[in-house]
Amino acid sequence: MRRAPRSIVALTTLGFITMHVPVLVLAVFSFNRSRYGASWEGFTLDWYRRLAERPDILAALKVSLVVGGLSTAIATTIGTLFAVGMTRGPRRGAAWLESLVLLPIVTPEIVMGIGLLALFATLGIALGITTIVIAHVAFSIPFVIVVVRARLAGMDRTLEEAAMTLGATGRSAFLKVTLPLLWPGIIAAALLAFTMSIDDFVITFFVAGPGSSTLPLVIYAMARRAVEPSINAVSTLLVAASTLLILGFDRLSPRRGS
Amino acid sequence: MSEAVVELQSVTRRFGAVAAVNDVTLEVRRGEFLSLLGPSGCGKTTTLRIIAGLETPDAGSVRLLGGDATRRPAWERPISMVFQNGALFPHLDVARNVAFGLRERRRPAGEIRERVARTLELVRLDPALYAGRRITELSGGQQQRVALARALVLEPSILLLDEPLGALDLQLRKAMQLELKELNRRLGISFVFVTHDQEEALVMSDRIAVMDQGRIAQVGTPAQIYERPRTAFVAGFIGLCNIFGPAKGAGHRIAVRPERTQLHAGAGPAGSPAGEITDVVYLGGTIQVHLRLDDGARATVQLPTGGADQAWRIGERASLSWRGADAAVLED
Amino acid sequence: MSVLRGRWLLAPGVFWLVAFFAIPVAVLAGTSLMPRGIYGGVTAGFTLEHYSRFLDPLYLGILARTLLLSAICTAICLLAGYPVALGIARSGRWKNLLLFLVILPLWTSFLVRTYAMIFLLRDHGLINETLMALGITSAPLHLLYTRGAVLAGLVYGLLPLMILPLYTSLEKLDPTLLEAAEVLGARPLSRFWRVILPLSLPGTIAGCLLVFIPSLGAFLTPDLLGGAKDMMIGSLIQNQFGPARDWPFGSAASVVVMVVVLVAMLGWLRRRPEVL
């Protein structure tokens, strides 16, 4: 493949600057001593220290972690079973299943959020951690399925068949051959689901109840009131967490286009 | 007929530290079928791509139809090219693939239609049947024909072919070899044909340029290349060849084809190579007798069957001789 | 094997997606057809009044503005994303790193990224302070709470969704096709129009949809970056379920959004079922 012309390299660089500089600036200024304005007045960790003294942020962190953990566990289990089922299920109804997986991915979040809100209201279910977990599982499952299926697609079905010719039952061939090979994909899917859960704002906004605010909800409330460095600090922590999780996800995913 | 349409003058192309093409000087004459022959990695494809303008030489010059073209881009050269796997555009049907270059040259629609149909017929694809086909609906052989039509429709002065038959099965390959040769004769276009298959090169070419490690080892007619190889590499790459060391320390090594080598039972005249028969292989029309000579070298003799004058046995001693006219003196 | 084969594996997933995706959307559709109750909920009955109310120029204006902003955002993302995708496809050994840098913003909080835009664009934000420090402007420009800010926020947030499918298409493109076009007489620009662009069309369409759809439903971006006059349909919906307390009307508006999305999706799904 030929090298890209200089103009393309320049535009590509510009694109990456656009995609990354705003958050980098945000992170840099979370270490700024100045409370107002955009002038740099020296390095400090004060804003991070202050976060630890705020009960609302600590409570929200706890809610985020509980919701993230629960919804990741449920969505990864259900999604993995679904992905495996799709590869060995009957061809009949496959198109229908594809749509069921695809539509939630492309539906605007706000539609899913108010839909769930309307459902919970109709059923008389009180909003709280339970409803947030239900919603997060619902939007994570399709992504888990996509990731695990990608891993399954790259796997050789004959391995399992070979195990069976060697005397393994279907179940034991799955558990001893397919599942171990599938693990990296499952972990990757779980990392993705956890990231989506701790980052989600729109859907959570509609299905959270009093006392069940997640970190993004607290950040939103703070951001609507005023711009202050502690928002930068908590935002930086959230971005750092997602970056680490996605780094892990990227390592475990099959390399695109190679 | 000896006017040169392609002239490469001391062309060199390096990739990193490796010179893929090293000081190559070569002429392609008007209307001739020239093959670039050599093992993979010898620089034959890079040479072809330099003629095409897809690679720029680091040193040397390229002249096409008498004019300097060293820095001229591919799209301004009087060439067309058939790629190894066709490189057909998957988003265009057969007719649009063939018409691609004509539309690039802004020919009128009527002319394009007429020339596309004519060229499809030329490569023996019925336009009524194939013009609207998608590329994915074609067999490998049909795809190669479309690729050929796409190049020929431009009526180039020079047609470059990069192992165009490599992906085809043997039957189809043989048929296409003869068709290509026939097209070359009929259209008067110069063909530069890259192949690693020596038999293919012998069958099709007016001249063959044998390449080895980025250099041209020898250029000549198939008969010259076969009968008078100039280096051990050429002798060994094309057909089987016996190579005998210089007699009594002086002079050059010589090469003699197995079918021009005579085999005698027992010891021959003084100084003639002798050794032990290691294998006798019956090939139908001929018998191959393999020997290990006393100096450790190996040799093969090919004899016609049916003579029945002698039954050769493994383990017996034999000696070799040849006519002076059948021996090629090697330069290396 | 029977436990592992087929239905039982699919059952929990089907249940969850039907119960917490399909049914909620159906509930919305139902709500949009029922009369409004006293406290914003619904009462039994059937009515099309919420849809006819949508024909009010005020709401049609919001819909039109949303479609326009989404279209402009999609166009900007396409123009900005195409060279980036091409650049990544030809970046050789940097490819994996660059791809990671495209994926990363997709999975970092959209809220945080929107807040980062506030931080840059506000009156005493980095852009204004820099402009003033350099003496280019003497007073802060009002960048925040404008339509331009909404557009910038959407483009910033959604650009990776354009780049990824474009890259996938361009990466699959066999470079010898470009060489074939070259020896057939095509100049660089012509090679782009006649070979690269048509072959990357699936990626272009996918990218445009992936950007257009979320920008249609955006509510966080106009809410945080836009002014009062920049309401998009997402904010309208949110408003009905929040302060305005008119769930049936909010449901009708979201059904309208869903219909636009489905129409766009159906046209595309017929051609290419693979996403992401």
Image (tube, rainbow, N blue to C red):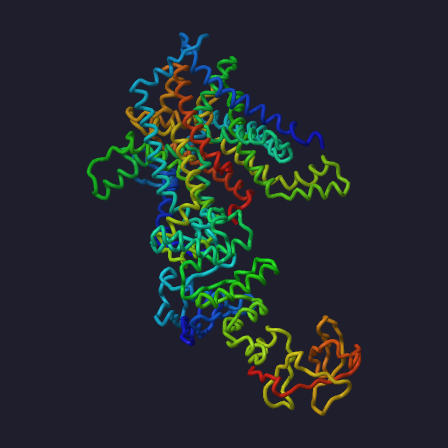
> Looking at the image, how many numbered discs can be counted on the residues?
0
- Give the quadrant of residue A205: top left
- Against C162, residue B212 (above or below) is below
**Near-viewer residue (C175 or C249):** C175
For residue C27, side relative to residue A6 (left or right): right
**Near-viewer residue (A253 or B75):** B75
- Against C235, residue B134 (above or below) is below
Which residue reaches farthest left?
C138
Which residue reaches farthest bottom?
B270
Residue visible at 62% across and 39% down in the picture: A183
For residue B241, side relative to residue A221 (left or right): right
- Against A204, residue C90 (above or below) is below
- Give the quadrant of residue A71: top right
Residue C213: x and y, percent?
41, 31
**Does any portion of residue C15 appear in the rendered image?**
yes
**Near-viewer residue (B225 or C108):** B225
Q: Quadrant of the N terminus of chain A?
A: bottom left
Residue B43: x and y, percent?
50, 68
For residue C102, side relative to residue B299 (left or right): left
**Near-viewer residue (C142 or A89):** A89
**Does any portion of residue A211 appear in the rendered image?**
no
Residue visible at 44% across and 44% down in the picture: C101
Residue visible at 47% across and 44% down in the picture: C168
Residue B216: x and y, percent?
50, 74
Residue B3: x and y, percent?
40, 75
